Image: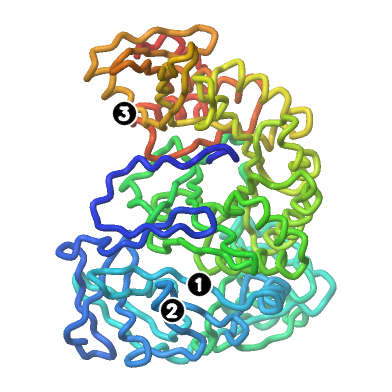
Amino acid sequence: MSSRRKSFFILMILSMIIVFVNVDGFLFAEALSDVDIKDSEIDIYFKGDRIRNESAYSINSGIYLPCSMIGKQIRSSKITVDDVNKQIVINISKADLILEDPEVTDFIKRNMENAYIPLRNIEGELYFPLDVLESFFHVTYSRDRNRIYIEEATESLKSMARINKESVEVKPSVTDKRSEDLILSSNDILQIIKETDNYYKVKTEEGVTCFLKKNDVDIFSIDLSQVDFYNFKREKMDYGREKINLVWEYVYLNTPVPDNDKNDAIDILSPTWFYIKDAEGNLGNKADKGYLNQVHREGYKVWGLVTNSFNGDLTHTVLNDEKLTKKVVAQLLFYAGLYDLDGLNIDFESVKDEDRDALTNFVSIMRYYTEKQGLNLSIDIMVPASWTVEYDRKALSQLVDYIAVMTYDEHWAGSTISGSVASYDWVNNYVIKSLEDIPSEKLLVGIPLYTRLWIETADGNGGKTVSSQSLSMEQVRDIIREKNLRVNWLDKEKQYYIEYFEDDKTYKVWIEDSRSIAYKLSLIEEYDLAGSASWRKGFEEESVWDVFEDIVKKGISYKEYRELEY
């Protein structure tokens, strides 16, 4: 996560040609080729016939088909291809949707105009994600190695039940412990699995199986092959007092390829997928269903992150217009269902002080509907200070499941003074101050997986100019090896430190590593916090995850790392 003052420093080598475009203060890049063609090419069969001169591609476990098939083999009156902006446009006003709750469906239909699905540019041709759009095209598909078989969806009638009383206490299924003492409310929708003389065996929108009396429900059928999109309510994850670690996944161009195995130090991945794009309340979307499916299989939860583009004027316009506020909420609810997210993470920064109540109102609306979807809701806020009064911490803590306090950027990218990104005392003091308004069981302490290289240059007048750049943990080690530097431990900051002089400039680094992070994570036990939130995946060295797993997940004392050498 970045603070309002953080400028993103992209530490990646792009193995592709890119074109940069500046939109609303963000730097975007258009990929000219973003997959390895040889390894991912798949033959396409539609209704049994091979589609000649066309191939599909597998990216992040997702299947991408050429847009040239739209209007030929596959069709939808609700979908158009926007070649200029390289996106699919779904006309939500015309779409037949069944989301997790009738009230959610109605809210989306009333407040949302279009949804936008990003396309891939592969060797100059645009490709769309089939796993996201198959229901809109009313097709099904299966894959057999390097072949994909696509068929038109056949009639798929589902028998459904709707509770016709104010409330009904249902009998539990002997095989599903979650269904004990279950109370269903009027108009709750259930899927009928089978029936006996007097009872239906049903599955709730949360996936719980139970038995109820036939006279407690009205029966109806849905032909899901004729519905453009449907999604049943997920069961909201309740972590109780379990300590959790959320890690933000920065998405610059495309979502990074996920790891092959579950990292037991991480519970939740939060990719930076959504952002308010313009003053009309449209959301930018960089979500990747293939990525989500893969990390779900590995055991992660995914909370999609939404930013306000860190634009105070844009945020002011949206949050003070009821129609635009609801439009943003509706889009987030729809994307959460479309991509099967487990939660949403709000990261609104550079919000004007005068919009404090408007921000709280936005979160309140989000909370009302995300509860109906079974989604976790969290928000990221800066440390409590005179310049962060836009966050009503007490009110927000009543609305969300977790608050991630961004206890880093003590010395931010544009600072005129060199210093630590997150010294121990600074983090500790702001955790204490945050606890005045935020319950400990909802507070995630922010952990930086990056540091800064500070460059001080004499200005000739007895002063100096200061600049900086972000570094990953491995890049710091490279500098130390290349320049044969000695590291020194700073006991006050609880960090290692290096300094060297080169080309009339002084270079300084307050290092983040396993030892420094162990000290910061010790605050979780000291104040019984909910866990940690780390910015960002890709900056860390592999060994640091052992620290997170030991301290956050296993409850091992930080003292095990207190004397760790660099």
Label 2 to label 3, Cα distance in Å?
Answer: 41 Å
Please state if 84 lies on the left or on the right of 239 as rendered.
left
In front here: 92 or 102? 92
The number of numbered discs placed on residues in the rendered structure image is 3
Question: Is label 2 or label 1 in front?
Answer: 2
In front here: 355 or 328? 355
Mark 1: amino acid: Tyr
Residue at the farthest right position: 166
Picture quarter with the C terminus = top left
**Could you say whether the residue bearing mark 2 is in a helix, strand or loop?**
strand
Residue at the farthest left position: 38
Answer with mark 2 or mark 3, whichever residue precedes in sequence. 2
Please name the residue shown 19% across and 70% down the image.
Answer: 41
Label 1 to label 3, Cα distance in Å?
Answer: 37 Å
Please name the residue shown 62% across and 84% down the image.
Answer: 93
Mark 2: amino acid: Asp
Q: Residues within 10 Å of mark 3 (few under 14, many from 20)?
A: some
**Could you say whether the residue bearing mark 3 is in a helix, strand or loop?**
helix
The residue that disc 2 covers is 82
Please state if 83 lies on the left or on the right of 32 as rendered.
right
Q: Are marks 2 and 3 in contact (CB under 8 Å)?
A: no
In front here: 425 or 246? 425
> Which numbered circle lies on residue 116?
1
The residue that disc 3 covers is 474
